[in-house]
Amino acid sequence: MEKIDISAAVVLLIMAFVLVSVKIPNDERWCAIRRMNRLLFACYICIGVSNIITGVCGVDTQPDPVMWLAMLLVSMYQAFLFTGTCVTFLSPQRVGVKWLSVNAVVITLVNIASFWAFFSNERSAAWISIVDAVLYSAQLVYYCYLFRKAYVESRRCLEASYDEDMSARLRWITMCFISALTVGICALLFAVLRLGATEYAAFTCIATVYYVYLVICMINYRIRAGFIVKVVAAAPISAEEHQLQAAIKKWVDNKRYVQDDQTVEEIAAELGTSHAMMKWYFTNRMHTTFRTWRIELRVAEAKRLLGEAGVSTAMVHKMVGIADKSNFHKHFQKYVGMTPREYQVSMKQGKG
């Protein structure tokens, strides 16, 4: 028995450091995945240390009421973290700091109340276990509902974007959740049926296999599931964002980006928004900065002008809103790969 716990601990600690080694982009869209990766790392460390303690101290061959209760209460945390991970795979915006905090606080309060009641009156241990088993069952049902809802919405969103049946591509995420649910049900049966050391050993083996599988899912998500992040990671567009989007389109159509005497704050006011909101919009929706985006527009306009007859390369920088000629040449060469004069010559040769 002790060997099983120690072996499981070694596997879990190795998996924890595998999680640390998973390279997750710094892009805002991957924020939820990074958060869950850190939480899983902490979870694996805690479970690994717990298994070491259990292995050193040993587990009685007779059923232990404290072990039943501890199994049930610890499983609440595990169900919370593992379900959060599976839902994050499908719909990252659902698993925010608020959702994590509320779930963690509720489960912690249940743990504190249960242990306090148990050690205050050990004769009520059976009733406490029944209450906790009902609460845990309700938790599993809620998480099934949450995962199902996230799966349906994510699949619909992905199929609208990729125009294909996504069932096969999402199957491994579904298997990840089903495996987590299986481990959770095993923990529930262990506590309700008051099983002993032999069954505990079997449960430890099943749970360890799942822990390894979850790490594989995290790695697979990083390697193969970027297509999900591209579509479903961003939060729904608000009415304010729709208005800003329309204002930006009108601003571009009117070629206001060629004005060289406007500050970003003035442009934000012209667009009917704040500087902070505009910065957030370009960072999170367009994944760039306003300055970079405007330079790209100006370079595109310069290319259009240089393709027209009679436009001087010496004056085109002013026509697109860049006062400094050397600065314009630097940006133009960066995005186009040649100087304005070289580009104009190539355009004339192409027409000729």
Image (spheres, rainbow, N blue to C red):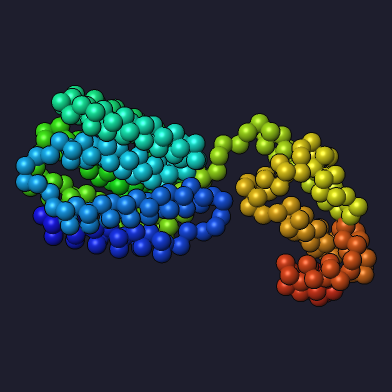
Rendering quarter of residue 129: top left
| Rendered location of residue 201, percent (x, y) | 12, 50
Residue positioned 80% across, 58% down in the render: 298
Figure check: 243 above or below 36: above
In this orientation, which residue lies closer to the viewer: 335 or 125?
125
Residue positioned 79% across, 46% down in the render: 252
| Rendered location of residue 336, percent (x, y) | 73, 68
In this orientation, which residue lies closer to the viewer: 351 or 214?
214
Report whether residue 138 is seen: yes
| Rendered location of residue 100, percent (x, y) | 44, 39
In this orientation, which residue lies closer to the viewer: 189 or 225?
189
Figure check: 197 above or below 115: below
* For residue 204, side relative to residue 280 (left or right): left
Rendering quarter of residue 199: top left
* For residue 262, side relative to residue 204 (left or right): right
Q: In which quarter of the image is the N terminus?
A: bottom left
Q: How many marks?
A: 0
Report whether residue 344 is seen: no
Residue positioned 76% across, 56% down in the render: 291
Residue positioned 56% across, 55% down in the render: 27
Figure check: 195 above or below 310: above
* For residue 126, side relative to residue 106 (left or right): left
Q: Quadrant of the C terminus?
A: bottom right
In this orientation, which residue lies closer to the viewer: 328 or 130?
130
| Rendered location of residue 311, percent (x, y) | 91, 65
* For residue 27, side relative to residue 16 (left or right): right
